[in-house]
Image: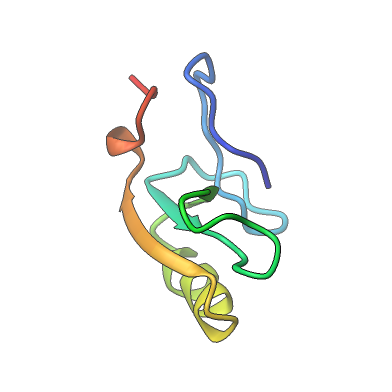
């Protein structure tokens, strides 16, 4: 599960085994190891947005969810 890069033409969902196009960017950080302004990104298709958000939310890691198109540096 990696940060999207501007040169990625096909961004795929971060859910295990899913190859669907990413629609959502789940921005998160682990406050025990990341500075407050650091954001890691998992990508999600419509089908996996809720399950990935719930996983991060249970750990208090999820900061926000935005459309992939809104991720800075992604065209």
Q: Which quarter of the picture shows residue 19?
A: top right
The furthest residue to the front: 35
Q: Position of residue 40 (x, y in %)?
A: 56, 49
Residue 50 vs residue 4, the one in the foreground? 4
With respect to residue 46, does 13 lie above or below?
above
The furthest residue to the top: 7
Q: Quadrant of the C terminus?
A: top left
The furthest residue to the bottom: 58
How many numbered marks does the figure carry?
Answer: 0
With respect to residue 68, does 40 lie above or below?
below
Residue drawn at 51 percent across, 49 percent down: 39
Residue drawn at 58 percent across, 77 percent down: 55
Q: Position of residue 71 (x, y in %)?
A: 35, 36
Residue 16 vs residue 73, the one in the foreground? 73
Residue 30 vs residue 25, the one in the foreground? 30
Check the image and tell me how it is coloured. Answer: rainbow
Q: Which quarter of the picture shows residue 30?
A: bottom right
Residue drawn at 52 percent across, 49 percent down: 38
Q: Position of residue 21 (x, y in %)?
A: 47, 40
């Amino acid at each position: 599960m990696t940060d999207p890069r501007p040169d990625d033409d096909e961004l795929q969902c971060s859910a295990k085994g899913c190859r669907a196009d990413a629609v959502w960017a789940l921005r998160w950080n682990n406050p025990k190891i990341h500075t407050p302004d650091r954001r890691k990104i998992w990508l999600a298709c419509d089908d996996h947005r809720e399950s990935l958000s719930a996983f991060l939310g249970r750990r208090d890691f999820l900061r926000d969810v935005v459309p992939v198109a809104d991720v800075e540096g992604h065209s």
